[in-house]
Image: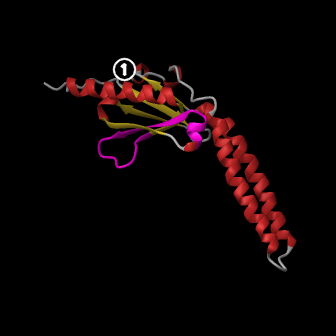
Amino acid sequence: MFDNPEIAIDDLPDAEDLDWQALHPLYARLIRLQAALGLAVIAIAISALNVIPNLPLLPILVAYLLLVGVGALVLVWPSLSVPRRGYVLRDKDILFRKGVLWQSVTAIPFNRIQHVETSSTPFDRRYALATLQLFTAGGSSGDLKIDGLGQDVAEDLRVFILGRTETSIERA
């Protein structure tokens, strides 16, 4: 007979008590580099406005001021967001947390994972970083994407998770 006992709220585990693994220390630097390159492209575009004849100076100054304000925020944000991201491997699942203002924790059970892949951009490879992406049943895009892992850590996690998914398939 099917048994599904009730669990008391006080017996639930607290996510804050877990040993969260931090992302690679160079990940924040990579995000800032990518942001700086994007800001440089925008600055060049604003500078190109100077060649338009009879264009008032005020819109160009406002654009530069906006660029400086947004640039400051974009360059500081990784220092706030990256330390608040992390992952935990447990016996039956992997948890990932993120968020500064809106915080979330995602749990993916190993028995739901169908595919795991690692990837890296040229910038990622420059800093020896990689992304781990987990795909579960029914999804066309990755259900969990963890950026900012060291290449060796991402590969170790991929192999471990694949091993756990094979074990859970054999037990079923």
Q: Residue at x 77, y 52 (%)?
A: 69
Q: Position of residue 9 (x, y in %)?
A: 41, 24
Q: Nearer the viewer, residue 154 or 113?
A: 154
Q: Nearer the viewer, residue 57 or 19?
A: 57
Residue 5 occupies quadrant? top left
Residue 30 occupies quadrant? top right
User: Any magenta on residue 131?
Assistant: yes
Tally of numbered discs: 1
- Amino acid type of disc 1? Asp
Q: Residue at x 73, y 52 (%)?
A: 70
Q: How is the image coloured?
A: secondary structure
Going by the picture, which residue comes out furthest to the right?
57
Q: Residues within 10 Å of mark 1 (few under 14, many from 20)?
A: few
Disc 1 element: loop
Q: Which residues are magenta?
A: 123-144
Query: Is residue 99 among what the camera can see?
Result: no
Give above or below for 154 relative to 122: above
Quadrant location, the N terminus: top left
Residue 11 occupies quadrant? top left
Q: Residue at x 71, y 48 (%)?
A: 36
Q: Which residue is mark 1?
A: 91
User: Any magenta on residue 136?
Assistant: yes
Q: Nearer the viewer, residue 158 or 142?
A: 158
Q: Position of residue 139 (x, y in %)?
A: 34, 47
Going by the picture, which residue comes out furthest to the left?
1
Query: Is residue 151 among what the camera can see?
Result: yes
Q: Position of residue 21 (x, y in %)?
A: 53, 24
Q: Position of residue 123 (x, y in %)?
A: 59, 42
Q: Residue at x 85, y 80 (%)?
A: 54
Q: Is residue 44 left or right of residue 2?
A: right
